[in-house]
Image (cartoon, rainbow, N blue to C red):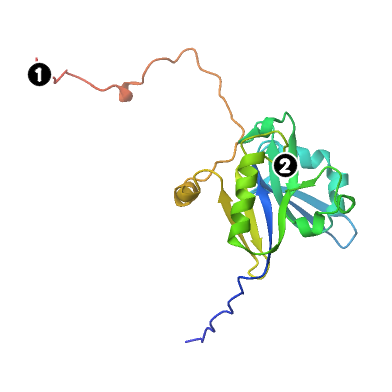
């Protein structure tokens, strides 16, 4: 049997970054650089790669429209939230936005594409459960930092630097997390509607509750 060493335990009392958790849909941009200097730009959701013909709330279409600007992200994979418009809470916005998760890398506006934002940073410093509660209550009291004036934000995300892990806390229903994780939000896929055949109508014979003699008691 191969010996497996017990992993080192990260220290809890280390720095963390707390950001607003935006209620949209998870999105990813991947840029592949080829030896000839050309690039491949891919758009994805949490679970799959997207195309304008097989999209998720129009994200792939947006990526294609902003391809030249998005190439400034450089080779690699960048995750973020695609939100606003008709996505989940909507935040009172007519347009949709893409906010990057990596605030340490993309916090400087001059370092990221003009079409991209970042998730709002609410706190950076030593981890403290009281500060976590303060950030959450402040968000509930003051409304969304991502969309000022919107009064129904979702919650926060805590990134613990030493652990390299993310933790989320929601303003409402946080204790129902297990139930929520068991029923994830579904992506919106293109709807294909076939024209109705006017020659067909009503129930098919095999769908009828009785076929043949009526066996109900008289």
Q: Element under label 1?
A: loop
| Residue 182 seen anywhere in this rendered image of the structure | no
The residue labelled by disc 1 is 217
Q: Nearer the viewer, residue 11 or 9?
A: 11
Q: Horizontal placement of 36 versus 102: left or right?
A: right
The residue labelled by disc 2 is 146
Q: Nearer the viewer, residue 129 or 12?
A: 129
Residue 177 percent across, percent down from the top left: 48, 50
**Disc 2 crowd, CA 10 A, few/some/many (<14, 14-19, 20+):** some
Q: Element under label 2?
A: loop
Residue 106 percent across, percent down from the top left: 81, 55
Residue at (67, 36) in percent of width and height: 57
Residue at (50, 49) in percent of width and height: 174
| Residue 31 seen anywhere in this rendered image of the structure | yes
Residues under labels 2 and 1: Cα distance?
Answer: 66 Å
Q: Nearer the viewer, residue 123 or 118?
A: 123
**Disc 1 crowd, CA 10 A, few/some/many (<14, 14-19, 20+):** few
Residue 51 percent across, percent down from the top left: 71, 41
Residue at (85, 53) in percent of width and height: 108
């Amino acid at each position: 049997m191969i010996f497996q060493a017990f992993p080192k335990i990260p220290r809890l009392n280390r720095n963390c970054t707390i950001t607003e958790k935006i209620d949209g849909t998870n999105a990813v941009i991947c840029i592949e650089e080829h030896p000839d200097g050309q690039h491949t730009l891919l758009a994805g959701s949490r679970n799959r790669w997207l195309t304008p013909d097989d999209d998720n709330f129009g994200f792939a279409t947006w990526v294609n429209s902003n391809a030249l600007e998005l190439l400034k992200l450089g080779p690699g994979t960048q995750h973020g939230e695609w939100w606003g418009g008709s996505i989940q809470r909507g935040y009172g916005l007519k347009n949709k936005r893409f906010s990057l998760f990596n605030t340490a890398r993309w916090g400087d506006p001059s370092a990221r594409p003009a079409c991209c934002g970042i998730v709002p940073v609410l706190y950076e410093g030593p981890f403290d459960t009281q500060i976590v509660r303060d950030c959450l209550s402040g968000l509930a009291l003051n409304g969304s930092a991502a969309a000022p004036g919107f009064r129904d934000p979702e919650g926060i995300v805590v990134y613990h630097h030493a652990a390299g892990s993310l933790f989320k806390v929601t303003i409402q229903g946080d204790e129902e997390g297990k139930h929520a994780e068991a029923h994830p939000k579904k992506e919106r896929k293109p709807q294909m509607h076939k024209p109705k055949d006017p020659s067909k109508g009503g129930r098919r014979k095999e769908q009828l509750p009785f076929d043949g003699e009526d066996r109900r008691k008289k």
